[in-house]
Image (cartoon, rainbow, N blue to C red):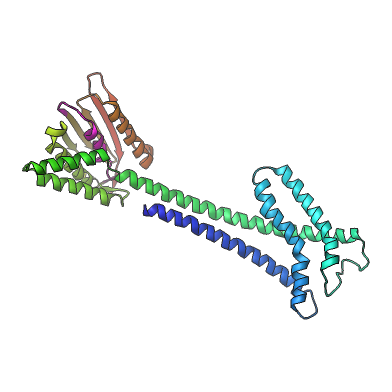
Amino acid sequence: MASIVQIEINNKNRWVYFTKYRWIAHLIYWTWVLIAGTIMSVSVPLTPAVLFHHFILDNLLIAVFYYTYCLYLIPYFFKRNRIALFWILTIASYLLIAALDVPYHHAFVHLSFEDPMISANASFFEYYYVNLGNYLLNFVIFSLMLFFMEKNEENHTLIELEKEKKDIEMVKLDLLKTNISPDFLMRSLSQLKYSAQQDFSYTPEAILSFSDLLRYRLYSKQKQLTELTEELTALQRLIYFINLYQNINHLNIQLNIQGDSASQLIAPLSLVNVLEPFCKASSNQPVVLQMIVLIDDQELNLEMDYGLRANEILLSDLKEYGMNYQQLYGTSIRFQFENCEDDRCRISLTLPLETK
């Protein structure tokens, strides 16, 4: 749960990051316009009136054109793949707002000097021609700034999404590794309660074995690999716990281990979890599950012979186990199971090992 909360926090932080740097980019651009277009251009003292006319009013319609372009045309047309309409509206906005800028400047903008590019008696079209050049220059600068800003955000987005994907995968891995079957847990607790009420002599050993198993699950979720010796010890404790109650669950497990496990590492709980589906499978008659563990230098082979045909529930649980561990560790996990003609179910599992 903590990991999922952290992912949500990362999402909010990323939005704050992009919003902050988007505004910084705009601030840098308008600061440049203020310095180059106003402070360095006028020869009179910088009064509020000069700043109002030379900076705010003089650039108002250019700003309207640009922000119409980047806040409306790009997201609603260009990014929705309506390219033709996007360019028609962009060019129309460019031509229209540049034309409106001519009477707007005559009526509202009072500059402290005359533009050297336009004579005092210039016609509408001469003003309009100069405006088209100014708008085009600003459009190119705006577009370049927007392009690099978008590329920067895109790169950061990809990095953040990749990180979040890994975080989500880690949460899923932890859940898969440490997930205990609710049915197995309830059965185990019911058996412990029953044996305690009946005051059976093996109750303390059963409680200790079950506690060790839960403790092993708790600490294994922090590991990518665990010592094979520890995994086999946990497996043996689980088998011992199950066999204590074989008169209730009608399941007897026989384990045979061949090979040296001293210097090997394995995926945690990969052997322990494969037993839980058999504990869940109910049977009214005694059944034996034979397990043979063969330890090689690079892999572990587990052969299981279940003395009954697997029902639909058991087959579904085995299939889910195989899918989970292939999701965890890829195609290096080989898991096969089938009901045989002699009314038995045989399971074969191959797990990769690593050397310390």
User: Residue 190: image x %, image y %?
Assistant: 17, 40
User: Residue 177: image x %, image y %?
Assistant: 31, 44
Drawn side of residue 12 relative to residue 54, left or right: left
Residue at (23% x, 31% y) in the render: 281
Residue furthest bottom as drawn: 45
Drawn side of residue 299 relative to residue 240, left or right: right
Query: Is residue 58 located in the magenta-colored stretch of the structure?
Result: no
Residue at (85% x, 66% y) in the render: 107
Q: How many tags in the picture? A: 0
Residue furthest top as drawn: 341
Residue at (25% x, 26% y) in the render: 345
Residue 282 appears in which quarter of the rendering? top left
Query: Is residue 286 located in the magenta-colored stretch of the structure?
Result: yes
Residue 199 appears in which quarter of the rendering? top left
Looking at the rendering, the stretch of residues picked out in magenta corresponds to 265-287
Q: Is residue 344 above or below residue 59?
A: above
Residue 132 in sight here: no
User: Residue 44: image x %, image y %?
Assistant: 80, 80
Q: Is residue 350 above or below residue 112?
A: above
Residue 206 in sight here: yes
User: Residue 93: image x %, image y %?
Assistant: 77, 52
Q: Is residue 167 above or below residue 282?
A: below
In the foreground, 134 or 225: 134
